Image (spheres, grey):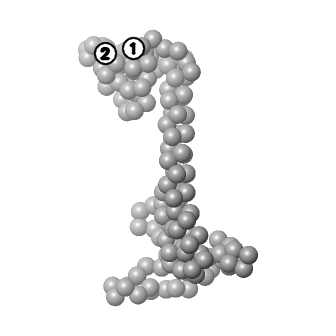
Amino acid sequence: MAYLKPQHEAFAKAFAASPNGAAAARAAGYAPSSAAGQAARLLRRSDVILRLAELDAEDEAARRGALAALTGKLEPVYDAALLAGDHDTVLQAVELQARISGLVQGGATIRPRRSAQGAARDDAGHESFLDELDYFDRQRA
């Protein structure tokens, strides 16, 4: 860990949380009138840059841990649905894992959409998608 003076550390943490130099400098206790200049100077310091990289790596590790925990919670649902032959729930679990991981966003889906009456508009994609997931191989095992 890069060692910084307390005020520099406070700046680095504030900047890592919200990358606005002047705001981070003010949060670290620098005078509002000189905050922008202090931020510019601090952001040129190698020790501050190193600390920002460390903080970024810590945040990324925490994010990856949270992603793993959330997607891991869906594994029992996936496994139970797989054993029960519940294709829609299998696909829902996979889609949720993909959304949590950021692989599927917005209105995109990996499952057929439901019509206004609640019936699936197209079930043809289920089997081909499950084939890609080795669903049927896992069923035979």
Of pointers 1 and 2, the one earlier in the residue sequence: 1
Against 98, residue 110 (above or below) is below
| Quarter of the view holding residue 129 | bottom right
Which labelled disc corresponds to residue 66? none
Q: Secondary structure at mark 2?
A: loop
Residue 16 falls left or right of residue 26: right
| Residue 104 in view here | no
* Residue shown at 33% from the left, 85% from the top: 116
Reading the image, the residue beneath label 1 is 7
Residue 1 seen anywhere in this rendered image of the structure: yes
**Mark 2 closeness class: few <14, some 14–19, many ≥20 residues within 10 Å:** some
State if disc 2 and disc 1 touch (CB < 8 Å): yes
Left of 15 or right of it: where is 61?
A: right
Image point 31% across, 15% down: which residue? 29
In the displayed orientation, state which residue is furthest to the top: 5
Residue at point 58%, 81% (across, down) = 85
Q: Amino acid at mark 1?
A: Gln
Label placed on residue 29: 2
Question: Total label count?
Answer: 2
Which quadrant of the rendered structure holds the C terminus?
bottom right
* Front residue (pair 101, 19): 101
Callout 2 amino acid:
Gly
Q: Quadrant of residue 108?
A: bottom left
125 is higher (above) or lower (below) than 105: below
Q: CA distance from mark 1 to mark 2?
A: 7 Å
Where residue 82 appears, x then y in whole percent?
59, 75
> Which residue is nearer to you in this view: 6 or 70?
70
- 3 vs 26, left or right, is right
